[in-house]
Amino acid sequence: MTRYDVVVVGGGPAGLAAALSARGEGARSVLVIERDTKLGGILNQCIHNGFGLITFNEELTGPEYAARFEDRVLAADIDLMLDTMVLDVSDDRIVTCVNAEDGLVRIQAGAVVLAMGCRERPRGALNIPGFRPAGIFTAGTAQRLVNIEGLIPGCEVVILGSGDIGLIMARRMTLEGAHVACVAELMPYSGGLKRNIVQCLDDFGIPLLLSHTVTRVEGERRVEAVWVAQVGDDGRPVPGTEVRYPCDTLLLSVGLLPENELSRQAGVELSSVTRGPVVNESLETSVAGIFACGNVLHVHDLVDYVSQEAGVAGGRAGAYADLIAAGKTPRQGHEIALRARDGVRYTVPQSIDPARMADRLVVRFRVGGVFENRYVSVYLDGERIQHRRKSILVPGEMEQVVLKRDELLAHADLSEVTVRLEED
Amino acid sequence: MEERTLTCIRCPRGCAVTVTLEDGAVVSVRGNSCPRGDAYARAEVTNPTRVVTTTVPVRGSDTERMVSVKTAGDVPKSKVFDVMGALRGIEVTAPVEIGDVLLADVAGTGVDVVATKRA
Amino acid sequence: MQDPDYDVVIVGAGVSGCATARELSRLEAHVLVIEREEDVCCGTSKANSAIVHAGYDARTGSLMARLNVEGSRLMPSLCESLGVDFMRIGSLVVCTSEDMLPGLEELRQRGVDNGVEGLEVVDRPRLLELEPSVAHAALGALWAPTAGIVNPFQLNVALAEDANVNGVSFRFNSRVSGLSRDDGGCWHVSCSTGDVTCRAVVNAAGVHADELHNLVSADRLAITPRRGQYYVLDTTAGNHVRHTIFSQPTALGKGVLVTPTTAGNLLVGPNAEDIADKEGTDTTAEGLAEVAEKSSVAVRDVPLREVITSFSGLRAHQPGHDFVIGEVPDAPGFVDCAAIESPGLSACPAIGRMVAGIVRDILSLAPKPAITPWRSSFVSLERATAEEWAALVETDPAYGRVICRCRRVSEAQIVNAIHAPLGARSLDAVKRRTEACMGRCQAGFCTPKIMEILAREIEGVDMSDITKAGPGSGIVIRTDRDGSAGDGR
């Protein structure tokens, strides 16, 4: 069986950054397995700009950002298997994959980095009543059709969901000559970046209908109209508020779901909040030697943070693989729980071993609602060590706190680290 | 005296910036948390601009049907659809490198349209 | 007078029409199947519970009962020879109320009278052994080991492919608008794609069978579309139950069933609602809510959160609640194969034989000396071992290119589906033959790829021409840049 120090599942931004970092950490052999015919992942179809402000201090489009990492990967003596689907990752890190040239291939990895990204929630999962006509697309599928295939899905569009993909596609369709009648959003706030509200909706006069949802689709063979209703505080449509929008296309931007089928098969413990693996400070999952990063771990908004996170996972995977190759057993960690409380919906990682931490650990989190004028506080057991004021915190924008190893080690008998929001 | 509040789009923070104008000239800017925001707000109320990103068909590439493109810099917001119109019917031939100028001085803006993807 | 174009015209390419076509293809006859939609299996045959019922439910002495039991006996070997997925998982009719327990014994007796084997009324302890996920209120059940589940799309397609390979012609996107019989006894079928003449007509037109029948007979037939809505749950919920679970009907009405499918999903439904609109295959908020509510009667903790899609199907219900199969007395040569509601799928092998037998006797058809054996090329990579998959890639590298990642459907399977007899031309047609698009992402990932393959493999077709389900359902409406409408509109 072929052996690699580090096998990275997925050649999108997370996989590429992880592979580079693993190589940089000294892993002798690194392999990236990607199911598409090229590297870049979802960035290949994200032709809009806004990527790389943090990483490169430039505003790049998705493909440009991907190319920067791809060039470095190609120059870094990292092996690639493209057009290859990973079918299984075992708990002893045997990766099974298939492609047309080699058939079924099994690879023994020293360490595995899961970087499979996420998929979109489809109409079927929402049970929107109606027929099953052509013309209903998730926003990402429509984006692929427009930007990769050069096909415009329709002319009269209604969009459900104001997440970034929905907003981006509102602009994209409009620029291509379609008319976007409205963007309906179930919540009383938008899930997308402010910048996208301005540049994708306001710029074109596309109304954003907060606290609204699509209650029915008309049209047997092709969408003919959708009905949009207000929703009450209970999230259910308010009778009598339905408005009919004639259209031929319904785009859905109603949630991204980390793609963890392989993780499940490997026995990796998943968090029901993030829908991604539960990880420690090294971004290692509950299965030794299997690491996770990027959208498969938790859905990100900024690719720059994906690259940073993947850099950590890849580096730690490389270090793990080195130990394995040297015949050593990686030390069992003493994990301290990292708790999300009081407005903080989740943290990644979910546990920390201070002895294994680097100097600094970035803890990423999301809040569960819209909060104004709050403090983001970090507690080591009962002792507050951070207390930072934020004028605005929204679910659609990932936040972070940075923990210092020295501080954690200095705290005697540390049993729990908490990240919470406080009013003062 | 005129006051306009807008959302800065220079980074994800989306600061609410208030610009005070007198006789069409900017008198003060507040609410931004960095100089980029100040510059953005001033420009946005006096001369709003945008970068346009779209795709054009490419011929002769093994890997791509479409090449993604962008205006190399900002163009006046009012010219966005003119830029799209100027790109209609354009077809590019492989090979294409990132940064290749595919259409110079698009719609008389003085800004080039460049490729953002290899093909 | 000219010879008729065909000996037999079958109207409708659902399981009934195709089972009949396959049986007729064993006889010396020119047969044409006329189908309104773009493919076989586009009506009730694609929107049902996919159950092969044991046969205790239908009234003793009815045609339904006889053909159900016969069809259920024929199904396993038919599926085996055609290469269609069939699993004999058994079914349980669960009783949740003390006063309904005697009803289980009545049902068992009816089954015995109908000729069903192996039926057994089981008590709660035995029921729990058989089905741990059964509801807390479950007191006992009728256990029917001969019941099974089948892949209805594969079955319908395979029957049609077999018929076609053995000489039966098929016309799609063709509507029958008129029927008349001339003095010479020849039938004239007015059809949107060209009129045809024939000596016998088989009416397998599903919910529209009454309309066809009433064109030729003074003896009115009335078909009411009875809509049933379903949830399809992810394969992660597929083994929530081991058998097909029915709720015993109570005073409140019929329950819904919960069953695994041959592809590994969980199916929940249907309710039953008589509607006026024969095209009413839409789901409704009320209907789905009703199914959700009833789902918990016989089975505990049905994980409805794992729903990946929902659909509705119409049963062709007729007031007498029995199949209407036979030559119409005042329309010689016109054979009804109508009111084929549940257990129509289960009975279809027997229905095919019966209808073909009637036509054979009317036309005095002789058997063919030889037939071409047919086995469809359905493959399941989801269930294949690593070695089996590797071997397939050896035969065709395109088995190594996964297109539908949710169901592990490879490019080879899609290409085969396109080039098979009566091959796929639309996304839905590919779906029926391969399981692609039926996974948790509901075609989000594979749609552009399948469009590309269809356009590549079919002469003279662009990606912008590809439809979801035939004319009027183009995936894209405009091609890039030039603003011209794609074929879909």
Image (spheres, coloured by chain):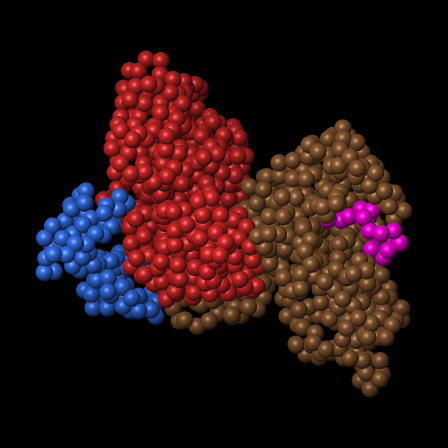
Residue A141: image quadrant is: bottom left
Asked whether residue B104 is drawn in magenta, I would say no
Which chain identifier belongs to the red chain? A
Residue C31 in picture, x, y percent from top left: 77, 70
Residue found 87% across the figure and 51% down from its top: C60
Chain B display color: blue
Q: Residue furthest front?
A: A240
Foreground residue among C236 and C2: C236
Whether residue A5 is visible here, answered yes or no, is no
| Range covered by the magenta-colored residues | C51-66
Along the horizontal axis of the image, is A141 left or right of C195? Answer: left
Which chain identifier belongs to the brown chain? C
Q: Residue furthest top?
A: A412
Residue B47 in picture, x, y percent from top left: 17, 60
Residue A364 in picture, x, y percent from top left: 34, 33
| Image quadrant occupied by the N terminus of chain C | bottom right
Q: Main secondary structure of the magenta part?
A: loop
Asked whether residue C64 is drawn in magenta, I would say yes
Foreground residue among A416 and A96: A416
